Image (spheres, rainbow, N blue to C red):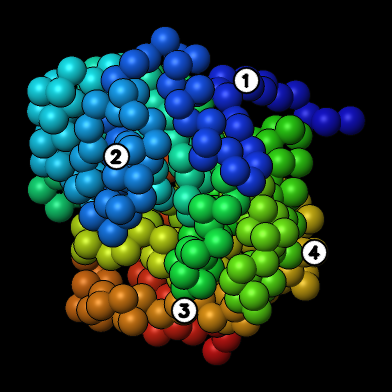
Amino acid sequence: MPDPFIYTASPGRVVFGPGTLARVGDEIASLGCRRALILSTAFQKPEAEGLAAQLGNLAAGTFTEAAMHTPVAVTEKAMKVYEAIGADCVVALGGGSTIGLGKAIAWRNDAPQVVVATTYAGSEVTDILGQTENGRKTTLRDPKIRPETVIYDPDLTLGLPVPMSVASGLNAMAHAVEGLYAPDANPVTSMISLEGLRALKSALPCIVANPSDPEARSEALYGSWLCGIVLGSVAMSLHHKLCHTIGGGFDMPHAETHAILLPHTAAYNETAAPQQLARAAELFGGDLGGGLYDFAKSIGAPLALSDLGLRQADLERAAEMAVQNPYKNPRDVTRDGILDLLTRAHAGQRPGAA
């Protein structure tokens, strides 16, 4: 018999399938909006301008300066554009950086959001916003942060570079792993976590072997959506705290930091939450931390924080920052424990190896 639990279903509309980019205009109109600000990073500027052309009069303009970790200064600049062009909603085309910018705008002015997800970030279906200011990344939750509509068009991921596909997919898997031992986990979110992990474990090696495999791309996007549901439904713990600390405090790339830390945070908590993590461990050979490391290595994921530019000398400060205002976690979060975890992750050492 399941333990007592509370489960609150999150609102939101999902449009999934090849060719659904063509539905953006319909989704804007269904929200009662007429002047969308199209958001992207500089890298995806051509795609944003192409979407604006497709939307015609429904597009009020573009803002193509979304940046990693959602800097407050960038959001303030985007807000000025939003107001100047008389926009009444935002369309975020891209991954976590662009989605974060759309959320940051909505948190400030309650703008309706349509997201066209082009990576496996998973954050597009959550009410969580992470922002960076003065070298610190902080998070907050609010219902108006969650996008109203998310469009998943696997065709848009066919050209996603393999390294980003791998890192982004492992980022999504981290949401699912943390969801299994979350203090407010429940049978519904745990079931979703396991299906998300299964889908991404199946899809990512196929994408590495054939990046243009439409079935694998669809499976990965499906898995990332499920992992995002978990991220938006329960509280996150040590893994996300560490990623926010290192990403925001040391300007490390978001998805790659998640990918590297996941095996180590899973191993850190595995002994304290064996029952919650047992079925996930089965997916990875019975040893979740080691199995995730081996899986990441097999698909060419980054393994060492040192390769991202984090210095050995930064580890003690990162550990000190990580234990400040810690999230609830199955295992006590201590400075020495986190420093050992980070030292292994910095060196790219397999969890549990001597």
Residue 37 seen: yes
* Distance between mark 4 and mark 2 Cα atoms: 40 Å
Quadrant where the C terminus lies?
bottom right
The numbered dot on residue 303 is 3
Q: Residue at x 35, y 45 (%)?
A: 50
Quadrant where the N terminus lies?
top right
Q: Amino acid at mark 4?
A: Glu
Front residue of 220/87: it is 87
* Distance between mark 3 and mark 4 Cα atoms: 22 Å
* Distance between mark 4 and mark 1 Cα atoms: 28 Å
Q: Which of the marked residues, 1 or 2, is nearer the chain's N terminus?
A: 1
Q: Amino acid at mark 1?
A: Thr
Mark 4 is surrounded, within 10 Å at the Cα level, by few (under 14), some (14 to 19) or many (20 or more) other residues, namely few
* Distance between mark 3 and mark 2 Cα atoms: 31 Å
Q: Amino acid at mark 3?
A: Leu
- Against 342, residue 298 (above or below) is below
Q: Amino acid at mark 2?
A: Leu
Q: Quadrant of residue 93?
A: top left
The numbered dot on residue 282 is 4
Q: Which residue matches tag 2? A: 39
User: Could you say whether the residue bearing mark 3 is in a helix, strand or loop?
Assistant: loop
Q: Is residue 312 left or right of residue 22?
A: left
Asked whether the beta carbons under mark 3 and mark 1 sit within 8 Å of each other, the answer is no
Asked whether the beta carbons under mark 4 and mark 1 sit within 8 Å of each other, the answer is no
Residue that protrudes farthest toward the bottom in the picture? 354
Mark 3 is surrounded, within 10 Å at the Cα level, by few (under 14), some (14 to 19) or many (20 or more) other residues, namely many
User: Could you say whether the residue bearing mark 2 is in a helix, strand or loop?
Assistant: strand
Q: Which residue matches tag 1? A: 8
- Against 351, residue 90 (above or below) is above
Asked whether the beta carbons under mark 1 and mark 2 sit within 8 Å of each other, the answer is no
Q: Quadrant of residue 304?
A: bottom left
